[in-house]
Amino acid sequence: MTEAIAYELAKKQQEISVAEFFERNKHILGFGNPTRALMTSVKEGVDNALDACEESGILPDIYVEIRNHAEEEECTIIVEDNGPGIVKQQLPHVFARLLYGSRFHSIRQTRGQQGIGISAVVLYGQLTTGKHAKIISKIQQDLPAVVVELAIDTVKNRGEIISQDIEHWEKPSGTRIEVSILADCKRGKRFVYDYLKSTSIVNPHARITFKEMDGTQHVFECTSDQLPKMAVEVKPHPYGVELGTMLKLAKNTNSRKLSSFLKNEFSSMGDRTTNAVCDEAQLDRNMDPGKMNRDQFMALNKAFKKIKIMSPSTECLSPIGETLIKRSLKSETQEISPEFIITATRPASVYSGNPFQVEVGIVYGGSLPKDKPVTILRFANRVPLLYQQGDCQSTIALGSIDWRRYGFDQPNGKGIPSGPAIFLVHVASTQIPFTSESKEAIADIPEIESEVVLAFRECARKVQFHINKKVKRVKTREKFELITKILPEIAKKSAHMLGRPEPPLDKVITSIMDVVWIEDLVEYEKVSGKSVEQKKLFDDSVQQQAGRWITKSTIMIVNYKPKPQKFSLYALIPQDAVVGTVSPKPVKITPQYIKWNVDGLASAKKMDISFELAGLSKGDFDVNDLYVEHINPAYVIGADKWEGD
Amino acid sequence: MAGSSKKTPIMCRPDVMPKIDAIALSVYDDLMNAQIPSLKLSTRTKANIRFDDKLSVWKYGKGMSERSAKSLDGAYMLLRTMYVVDFIKEMIKVSKTSTLREMYYISEGWNLAKFGSQNESDMLAEDLEVITGCMREDFKLRPEEDGARVIGNITIEEMTRNKTKKKIHCQDDVGDSGYSIPYNVEPEKVTFKSIDADFILAIETGGMFDRLVENGFDTDYNAVLVHLKGQPARSTRRFIKRLSEAKKMPVLVFTDCDPWSFRIFASVSYGAIKTAHISEYLATPSAQYLGVTPSDIENYKLPTDTLTDEDVHALKSELDDPRFQDQFWKNEIKLQLSTGKKSEQQALAKYGLDYVTDTYLPEKLAELGVLKK
């Protein structure tokens, strides 16, 4: 009887077509409603375009257009890039076959991964409008472009070429996709705009043009001509590896010994760690991995977690960098004219064997509203996350900080603070742990939460420092007014009334001010050719970028205290800077700072310090971060207490 | 110089000039000695007034404030002081006077030393009084406000602008609005030729003053009615003091029933906090508060308004005001805080226009022993 039922059941068991799968799961894939569908379609197209350009070392120049149709809810989306193009044979696979991609099996930071994205858009268009996707691709300057119309055979999960042709295309190379979909472009275009703008912030090397239905065109210019550091493919780290993966690796390895298998197939495994793991698992390091049984692999897997293994290499990550985030934010927030922008990039870290890195930025002041919650811009692997803000671990992490300490409003010291600021958070990882396949929120991972908190704390401290410095400066400016204008008038008037000579004021001035005043100025100078001598201090990659703009920082120190002053001054310099001429001679230069000793600056005397930075764009370095040591910081206006390296 | 052209015969005290120069000299010496220039003066706050047993008025205590050039505000204040002092010297030299308001406008031409508001320049004039012990009249500065009114059976002789003496009977020679008190009521300006009255009734509001005049209260009860016009000007207070001392007449103060009116009484009787340096010239320690008291509101069942937050705050502040520490005031203030009600003196009209003169005042005056029951 039982057998008979099984046969019965077998008749019903069949392959599920991708179309059906898609239809049932379209909300998880980001096509849940017509507004979302528009945004998701553009996003998948742009993510692909950016990845394609970067992989071939081309600065992305991306064109996005939305066209409206006569029919209410149907529109055409066009995404065009200047990437390497795609060979004709691959077109049906790339655009019309789900779960087909080049990146799923590699461990490095990329935008797309599973190979669902763009094919899902094509499928969604086909299901909702019945129209085919049109692809143009050009792979070489002297070849014509290929034009194909694609459909997805939803039963076989294969792309079908409906028509093909060749045509002339101005571009040296590139890909263009046109898909008609059912979408609400009236409501959706705002999200598309936000998405593209955000994308431009975290992709400073990309130029993005967006043309709306009515012909309005927005251009998000690139603010950097440096391609992001190529993320290198790495081997799996023992901490994150699952048993099945180990079995597969063992099956395919060329290593004949367990020890060499561990060293060759995993990252961060040196001799010492390898021996420690084998000892812990009680396995002979000379045994053949091909002959190991399941229990032995289990033991090995358990041993991995007990041994302290070096963090995975971070070459597989491509963070944006403090300077570039700042430059991008500056360019995108021009109309707000913020008071300052502060960014921080944390060192790479690891969760479950996956390397990740957190970067944050704070845009503060200007015309931003003071009584509204701060705007949060979230990014994962340079892709904006526009939905499910409240569920995202990065939001929860920043909400756990007591922002009241840093001058923000925050009821009960929890949640999203209010204040004139924009917060940016970028998580880069080989594997972003999303809460769901729609990839809108980062999952609850304690390691990530802690890094986000640390990064924001670092920025918040600087925000507070800037605010304090401003308040102190205003107060002291008043004193300047006092000593330069009011006091001489008092002296003049009293002398005049009494018919006596005017009294000298130097000593009174120092006892009124009673501070060491430090004022700084940053200027930029355009450099033609190689007229400026540059000290080669840091790595060569930076050196190649140097030139064009020289950032000149001038610091004036005036001792308005009645006694001579002796102290050390530190000026922080940005990561990517190359130090040029420094005057007077500093006592120390490190990649982080320049240090001077101020020796016995006499009362009412002034001292000038200057340094030049190359390798930065105009505006990258716009405020000096100055610190003092061996002097009571309360006596100093314009610099903070040095807390050590 | 844009001073007033009115020639007012104010005697100049011979020690004014050196006292004024001393201010400039102290600032100059500080600068010469490499000290931050500063001026010290009595702290002019509620916390720094003490009862002077000899004078029976409230004077500034030992608390001193420093106006120092260490702060921007202090430096501005010193610079303005230099300008004002120079201006006063100049006026004394050419025998002119100026109103406080005129001085404020003249300061427009003082560049950095320009005043932000007249309040600032008035305060500075008072500061100079406190520092030097002179009166602002000595500095040739006179107030804007005067014109508080008097009606009663007294004859005043006033030295007029034409340098002629003029006798004025404050019932027969004046209209219904009464004799107008000039800003200077010192003997060189005002003398009392005859006084035939039993008491002085000082009234806060013009409406009540006119009611008593219309009802003939001054003749019926042989009273001198003085209109205080709200918080009374220095000359009004000085006039009341001189008049009461001239014939040992009791002074009764009749105001609304709210914390601000209590302060009016305090400035007449005890001396105002702002002018505590000259309380002995201005205050009449024998003056008594007639009403309207918070108890009157209850006893006479007067129409009321609810106390505002500011009223409550002012009442609470009076509870720690050293001038209101006697049992009468403590009880009345606490009563008002508990009822939460205030009344105007004109609320007595609830019982008819003659009620105040026929019933309320006679009852209250009898209660205070001014009239026989």
Image (cartoon, grey):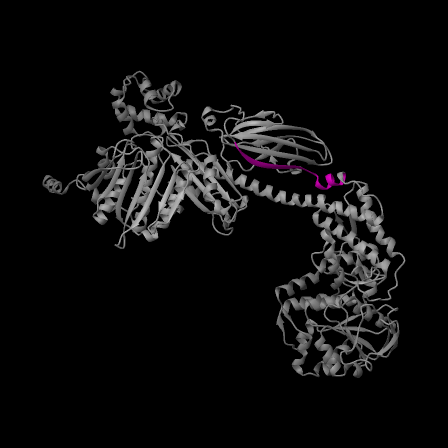
Q: Which residue lies furthest to the top in this view?
A: A286
Indicate the position of residue B362 as horizontal and vertical percent values: 76, 80
Q: Which of these two is toward me, A121 or A172?
A: A172
Q: Choose top left, top right, bottom left or bottom right for residue A253.
A: top left
Q: In this view, does A334 lie to the left or right of B355?
A: left
Indicate the position of residue A63 as horizontal and vertical percent values: 34, 42
Question: Which residue is at a point 40% across and 41% down the rendered structure image?
Answer: A200
Indicate the position of residue A468 as horizontal and vertical percent values: 59, 42
Question: Which residue is at a point 32% across and 34% down the rendered structure image?
Answer: A83
Q: Which of these two is toward me, A98 or A221?
A: A221
| A304 up-or-down from A200: above or below | above
Indicate the position of residue B359 as horizontal and vertical percent values: 72, 82
Question: Which residue is at a point 35% across and 36% down the rendered structure image?
Answer: A50
Q: Quadrant of the C terminus of chain A?
A: top right
Q: Which residue lies furthest to the right in this view?
A: B14
Q: Is residue B219 visible?
A: yes
Our reading of the magenta stretch's main secondary structure is strand
Q: Which of these two is toward me, A518 or A351?
A: A518
Bounds of the magenta segment:
A507-526
Q: Choose top left, top right, bottom left or bottom right for residue B171.
A: bottom right
Q: Is A523 within the magenta?
A: yes
| B44 up-or-down from A285: above or below | below
Q: In this view, does B103 lie to the left or right of A566?
A: right
Q: In this view, does B24 lie to the left or right of A303?
A: right
Question: Which residue is at a point 87% across and 53% down the rendered structure image?
Answer: B18
